[in-house]
Amino acid sequence: MPDPTRERDLAAAADAGIHLIALPTPFAVGRVNCWLIEDDPLTLVDCGPNSGTALTTLENGLRARGHRVEDLQRIVLTHQHIDHVGLAQILADRSGAEVCCLDALAPWLATFAEQTVVDDIFSSALMHAHGIPEDMVLVLRSVSASYRAWGASVAGGVPLTPGGTLSFADRSLRILHRPGHSPSDTVFHDEARGILIGGDHLIAHISSNPLMARPLDSTGATPPQERPQALVTYLASLAQTARMDLALLLTGHGDPITDHVSLIAARERGHERRKRKIAGLIDQGPRTAFELATAMWGNIAVTQAYLTLSEVLGHVDLLLNDGTVTEHWSDDGVVRFSAT
């Protein structure tokens, strides 16, 4: 049965000229939400993975609105993950649409294949440093390489400056950088209508995982000792969003959000609980991040190892910043965390 709340919220978005086209992905998160803004220029926000099934579904969604791929004039990308950017170049080639993304992301997308290889080197070094067994690292490298085909490079992306505006005939969207889930997360605020197009910055049914990722401006694989604090960054971004006056937040997956302040508060409480639980485990004796992950979740599926590592390290970073935990690098290059 249709969800009346979801239908109401999608109708409110449609009244503002913003229409959902949900595309299939091969990933556990399920369908990705692309948002068609029927304005001048005709704009698609996010575009799904590089697959024939996603492209056919998009063509059907556009046709239902009386459009074709060739009618698109602008493609806007919320962040670098392949379920959001994979079709961008194909659509741009067919339509002549300009592809717009965060200024720091444009060079990364232009050299997608090379960048993802360096990203894999970074993640492998991070996994080795935090105790993930070599066989799991090798499997994850193989899985990551196989996923690359769902993404693609984007040539000549139009860079968007945080704080600037994306202009249309009938609206203007404020460009806001909200890193954490990825380094490039960008949200677009229609201040006049109280609508935020948020990508994966905030999702109603699941917590957006702040994945450990190499900074966009790094020229090589960042050493594990200099890893970014993804969760700390993400919580700061959420705090900024919580202060916004929004009627509707259109997400990259799942249903729209109408009470972002309460949802963000719930997410913050959840991270605080997890931080305390990890602190309790560290109090029992020094452990690697992988040992903390297995203590939290038991036997971890290989495909989930990097996700859980990011989860643990994010909360350990909160404890490190609190001064309640310290990290120690052993001679074998593995990090263990202990209570101060």
Image (cartoon, rainbow, N blue to C red):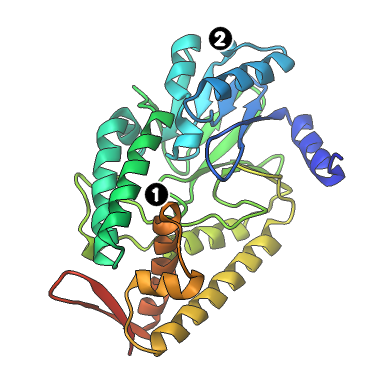
Q: Which mark is residue 183?
A: 1
Q: Where is residue 200 shown, x and y percent of the image? A: 55, 46
Q: Which residue is mark 2?
A: 70
Residue 217 shows in this picture = no
Q: Amino acid at mark 1?
A: Pro
Please tell me how crowded label 2 is: few (under 14), some (14-19), or many (20+) other residues with Cα within 10 Å: some
Placement of 304 over or under 100, stated as above or below? below
Q: Nearer the viewer, residue 249 or 91?
A: 91
Q: Secondary structure at mark 2?
A: helix
Q: Nearer the viewer, residue 86 or 267?
A: 86
Q: Amino acid at mark 2?
A: Glu
What residue is rendered at 24% in x and 65% in y?
129
What residue is rendered at 65% in x and 67% in y?
266
- Quadrant in which the C terminus appears: bottom left
In this view, which residue lies farthest toward the left? 331
Q: Which mark is residue 149?
A: none
CA distance for labels 1 and 2: 31 Å
